[in-house]
Image (spheres, grey):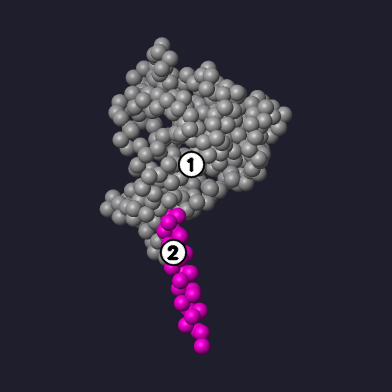
Amino acid sequence: MAATFASEHTDAGHQFAVFDEGDRDRFIASFGDRAFLLHHRLADNPLFSLPRLAVAAERMIHAGIGNRFSVRDGGYDVAKPYSSEVERPKSLSAFEELRDSALFIKLSNVSAVDRDYDDLCQEVVADTEALLGHTILGGVTMVHLSMFIASPHLVTPYHIDHDANFLCQISGEKDVYLFDPHDRELLPTDEIERFYLGETNAARYREEFQPRGRCFRLVPGMGVHHPPLAPHWVRNGSDISISASIHICARDLDRRAHVHQMNRILRKARLHPRPPEQSQLLDSIKASGLELLGKSHPTSSRDIIYSGVDRLAKGLNQVRSVASRARSWAHLP
């Protein structure tokens, strides 16, 4: 049975807390490693009403980050590539069309443009630290809040995410199927490496492994903790679903991602690199190179994870281009 966590505080400022020390012990043991259910106090927050979310979307457009507000045609197939949904023109009218359409709306990192959401996000981090009994911000590289708003019965296809997150149900219901991120038969190293080289759909759903998943039924006031890289898919209930996701990127996770990236590059060179976490020295060497190439002032988790390998790929392509031209020139009369 899944462990659940709820608040013993009457102070509305606490988003997460625990019933007793036993629950707290399980929270500490599970955070960042295993999925678990939790209670939260976000469901009645007016920040998450459809009109207020439409205001947030409008602010994103005006702030020049309208690309973080997406409207897509939803689907019903768990095995469909996660990034294959058709993008629709951005329109605030989508918030009014949810019930009678098949739409999926995402506000990515809305906390970066709207202070109210950022304040709430920081409250969740503070509660998480209180539960763990130590600070995590020293090792955190990015914390942000994203919103998922979807029409009834839609399926979010099987995929993986880099960060740890709390997925909190605000309105409607959904079933979240989460799988063990440590199961290398279900999630092979090859799929992780391809994911970290930018292949969003690298994690492949295989129906024979479905019994290995755990189903978490989310109703308003309930949430589930997703460990990093935990494969998952979601089926909405019979009403419009509104979910808030608090994402936490940590320095050790980012470095592990860079090790996977470098291992993939080395593998393409027909070498046989060690997996992450087998050698601290080798991991440090691999990760440091990509960190030095990465953006010095990242503004998103994507910048942190991918900017180094993107620059490396661009440099290698330029070298190949110069080499190709040199070979061509060598044959000129």
Q: Give the residue drawn at x 44%, y 39%.
A: 163
x%, y% of residue 205? 57, 45
Q: Is residue 246 magenta?
A: no
Label 2 amino acid?
Answer: Leu
| Residue located beneath label 1 in the image | 161
Q: Secondary structure at mark 1?
A: loop
| Residue located beneath label 2 in the image | 316
Label 1 amino acid?
Answer: Asp
x%, y% of residue 240? 64, 26
Q: Which residues are magenta?
A: 309-333
x%, y% of residue 280? 28, 50
Q: Across the whole image, how many numbered discs are drawn on residues? A: 2
- Is residue 214 something one can see in this rendering? no
- Is residue 194 something one can see in this rendering? yes
Q: Give the residue drawn at x 52%, y 22%.
A: 47
Q: Is residue 305 above or below residue 4?
A: below
Q: Quadrant of residue 80?
A: top right
Q: Are marks 2 and 1 in contact (CB under 8 Å)?
A: no
